[in-house]
Structure formats: C-alpha cells, structure tokens
Amino acid sequence: MTIFDFISSVLISKKYIELDTECEKEFNLYMMNRWLSMYSPDVASLINATTNQWWVIFDNKQEQYNFLFNLLAKSKFKKINYLKKAIKKQKTAKDEQEKLDRMTAHANFMSIKQYQELQKSVCM
C-alpha cells in the first residue's frame, strides 16, 4: 500500500482498509494530512481544525485512519498537485557585482560615520 491508496480510500472510493502490520508501517498521519490538505481549501481547513490539533488522542494508526475515513465526505477524483517551493533564479555575475557594490557602499558609509564620531569625541 502506498500513501495514495490510503488517500483514495479515505477521500475518493470510501473503501475501508483494515490496517494490518504491513499497512500500518506505510500509514503516516503527517503525510496523509499534508496530501489531503492539498486537495481543496475546504479539506485543508477541516484537516487543520481537527486532525492537526487532535492527533494526540489516537492510540494507534488504525484509529487515526478511522477518524479520517469518517471525517471526510466522498469526493470526486481530481489530481492533487504537490505544492513545492518556488525555484530561485540563478545568480548572475551582474547580481553578484550589485551585491558587492551595495556592501561596499554600506562599509564606506559606516567608516565615515565612525570617523565622524571619533572626531566628535576627540574635540570634546
């Protein structure tokens, strides 16, 4: 069994799965919550309001599965797009030079400021 089999049984087919020792190893509540919350904003709100807060009351994975199975209504199949971090653009030589210029300007400003403070303390 994969995580997608569990998601399908809880959300789409509503075919109950009895978790044996092999299935219990594959079942992960964190990953179930993560994937189910990507199905729709309504499911995400429901998951956040229930299982993310009450996960500690379950003694075993079968109880966690039963809760999800009974909590969520049967839904239509739709592809769940996995949310990823945005890919950072590649830094170019121009970007690096601009960063170096800003750092140099800041260092020069700080040097001038420190020099002025030193002059003030010597004159007093």
Image (tube, rainbow, N blue to C red):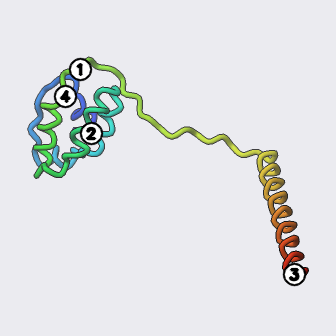
The answer to whether mark 2 and mark 4 are in CB contact below 8 A is: no
Quarter of the picture containing the N terminus is top left
Q: On the image, which quarter does residue 114 sit in?
A: bottom right
The disc labelled 4 sits on which kind of residue?
Answer: Leu
Residue at position x 33%, y 39% in the image = 34
Residue at position x 13%, y 37% in the image = 67
Q: Which mark is residue 15?
A: none
The answer to whether mark 2 and mark 1 are in CB contact below 8 A is: no
Q: Residue 75 carries which label?
A: 1
Disc 3 target residue = 124
Alpha carbons under labels 2 and 4: distance apart: 12 Å
Q: How many labels does the image show?
A: 4
Disc on the earlier residue, 1 or 3: 1
Residue at position x 11%, y 37% in the image = 66
Q: Residue 32 carries which label?
A: 2
The disc labelled 1 sits on which kind of residue?
Answer: Ser
Residue at position x 22%, y 23% in the image = 12
Q: How crowded is mark 4: few (under 14 residues within 10 Å), some or many (20 or more)?
A: some
Disc on the earlier residue, 2 or 4: 2
Alpha carbons under labels 2 and 1: distance apart: 16 Å
Q: Which mark is residue 72?
A: 4
The disc labelled 2 sits on which kind of residue?
Answer: Met
